[in-house]
Image: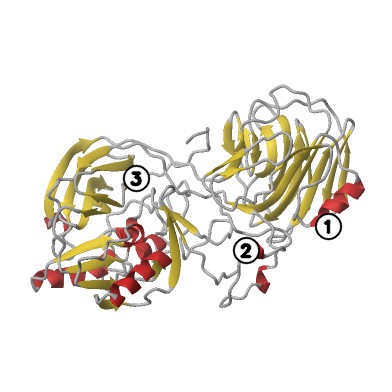
């Protein structure tokens, strides 16, 4: 991580790599393991459920294992802020917040270190109780309603500490001591302990602001009525983050301080602000956020946001120049509870130098990613991946997917590719062995094996590649979509339309095809899917 960040351990063995490469590229495997292992790399050409018989490309010797933690939790880090040991004289902190389920102590707005007990903090306690701290002084107040916007103003005066919630003065305390800013950065959605970020927020934020002096009751009410739609016109304004970027990993300070912030672990844009009523947006009619004057801006944070493990490479393998366009597997072999076990990392290879086959099979990798819950299941000797409700590791890493909300109830819209995806394993069952059901790669391999048996020449690529390469379909006589091809990008669908209009042939042996729209961000490796229905 770029900045010190609370870590979570994931016992057992977990790994990931690039999800697709080209012949001649180098595969970078990134593994965390509390146990010894060795690794073999195969072309996936074996009979069903017999990956160990697949063509062996490389065997990587025994390794004792390297433990690599994960660092979930999104927040905004503002490095250029109040100077360390600067005395806190007077200050006003303003923010709109919409909390989800508050399961642990969380920070909304802070420059605070729990180790030194210096600085200020506005936060929430389990159950959603509003809480503030100024140095060693603290106060716990009313409980905020879940999934409702609340306007908060914390006034730090020379001799008083006041807190307004939705325009009402709910706290007026005598200030007990002098207090100084710590050396830690200013944070939205986090506070620090001994310089390490933690106490991550499960809430939506809108238009956080700082002022050099307290706000009057009239000014508080004026800001409440504004509903977060505009920057304050106040001569004592220090900083204002309008959150109008709606994309990217930086937020701009429109105030005179110019304290710009960096979003860690992505967060979620396009949530709307306090003035926005999402129930008025029709599902099947046109709607443009850019021209909706009531939409406002917000940033959603989650204590379990994780899109890139940032693990170090533990094994490398250079893909031979003559490698076929197909699916490959890196298989980790290890002992678990006295029995042989394995863990598969699936990846695709394309060879642009080889002649194209007559048939192109498009694997439903978007769907595999959508169903990747949990990405860190307990290590097991079983070939069973209990989708959605699989047991978590003891350290409780993230489990969200297109079908599982974030831990605090936020609907999950974004899914990283730089994390393990055990749902893509070629032998995984989504049911008990006696049922033998799978809807991911194992299901699709039945078609691949049939093509082999009937001596058809074919290539296999992933959904990810279709989204990226505008000319991918050119030169193929027939495309085949097999399995559960539920998630498509707009660009991929348009390419398919163009292919058919130009005389191409299409075989569809897929259920629930093209139901949900996704998009891919190549820079972050994130797939986004905004499902309409959300169950509270």
Q: Note whether 448 is above or below 343 in the view shown.
A: below
In the picture of the structure, the residue carrying the numbered disc 2 is: 289
Q: Quadrant of the C terminus?
A: bottom right
Circle 1 residue: 225
Residue at the image point whose x is 63% and y is 57% from the top:
101
On the question of residue 143 being in view, the answer is: no
> Which is more N-terminal, label 2 or label 3?
3
The residue lying toward the viewer, choosing from 53 and 495, is 495
Q: How far apart are marks 1 and 3 (CA)?
A: 53 Å
Which disc number belongs to residue 12? 3
Question: What scheme was used to colour the molecule?
Answer: secondary structure
Question: For this view, does 319 lie left or right of residue 417?
Answer: left
Q: Which of marks 3 and 2 is in front?
A: 2
Within the image, what quadrant is residue 263 found in? Answer: top right
Looking at the image, residue 213 sits to the left or right of residue 199; the answer is: right
Residue nearest the viewer, comparing 331 with 218:
218
Q: What element carries label 2?
A: helix
């Amino acid at each position: 991580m770029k900045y010190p960040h609370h870590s979570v351990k994931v016992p057992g063995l977990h790994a990931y790599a690039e999800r697709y490469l080209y012949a001649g590229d180098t595969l970078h495997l990134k593994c965390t393991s509390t146990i010894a292992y060795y690794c073999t790399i195969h072309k996936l050409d074996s009979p069903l459920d017999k990956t160990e018989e697949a063509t062996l490309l490389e065997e990587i010797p025994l390794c004792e294992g390297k433990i690599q933690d994960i660092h979930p939790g999104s927040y905004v880090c503002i490095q250029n802020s109040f100077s360390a040991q600067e005395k806190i004289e007077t200050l006003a902190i303003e923010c709109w917040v919409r909390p989800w389920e508050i399961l642990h102590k969380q920070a909304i707005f802070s420059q605070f270190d729990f180790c030194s007990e210096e600085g200020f903090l506005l936060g929430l306690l389990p159950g959603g109780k509003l809480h503030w701290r100024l140095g060693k002084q603290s106060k716990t107040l009313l409980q905020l309603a879940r999934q409702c916007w609340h306007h908060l103003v914390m006034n730090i005066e020379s001799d008083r500490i006041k807190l307004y919630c939705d325009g009402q003065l709910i706290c007026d305390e005598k200030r007990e001591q002098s207090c100084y800013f710590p050396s830690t950065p200013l944070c939205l959605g986090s506070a620090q302990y001994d310089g390490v970020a933690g106490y991550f927020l499960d809430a939506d934020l809108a238009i956080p602001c700082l002022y050099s002096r307290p706000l009057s009751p009239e000014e508080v009410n004026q800001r409440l009525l504004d509903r977060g739609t505009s920057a304050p016109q106040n001569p004592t304004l220090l900083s204002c983050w309008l959150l109008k970027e709606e994309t990217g990993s930086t937020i701009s300070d429109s105030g005179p301080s110019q304290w710009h912030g960096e979003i860690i672990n992505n967060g979620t844009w396009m949530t709307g602000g306090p003035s926005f009523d999402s129930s008025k947006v029709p599902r099947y009619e046109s709607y443009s956020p850019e021209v909706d004057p009531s939409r406002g801006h917000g940033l959603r944070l989650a204590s379990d946001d994780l899109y890139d493990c940032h693990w170090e490479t533990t094994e490398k393998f250079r893909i031979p120049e003559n490698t076929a366009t197909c699916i490959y597997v890196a298989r980790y072999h290890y002992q678990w509870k006295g029995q042989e076990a394995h863990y598969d990392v699936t990846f695709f290879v394309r060879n642009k130098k080889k002649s194209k086959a007559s048939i192109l099979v498009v694997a439903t990798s978007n769907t595999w990613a959508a169903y990747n819950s949990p990405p860190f299941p307990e290590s097991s000797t079983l070939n069973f991946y209990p989708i959605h409700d699989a047991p978590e590791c003891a350290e409780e890493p993230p489990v969200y997917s297109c079908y599982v909300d974030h831990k605090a109830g936020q609907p999950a819209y974004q899914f990283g590719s730089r994390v393990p995806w055990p749902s893509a394993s070629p032998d995984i069952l989504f049911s008990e062995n006696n049922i033998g059901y799978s809807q991911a790669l194992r299901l699709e391999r039945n078609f691949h094996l049939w093509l082999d048996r009937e001596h058809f020449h074919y290539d296999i690529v992933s959904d990810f590649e279709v989204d990226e390469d505008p000319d991918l379909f050119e030169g193929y006589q027939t495309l085949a979509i097999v399995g559960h091809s539920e998630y498509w990008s707009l660009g991929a669908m348009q390419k398919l339309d163009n292919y058919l209009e130009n005389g191409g042939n299409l075989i569809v042996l897929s259920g629930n095809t093209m139901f949900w729209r996704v998009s891919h961000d190549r820079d972050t490796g994130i797939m986004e899917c905004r499902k309409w229905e959300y169950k509270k």
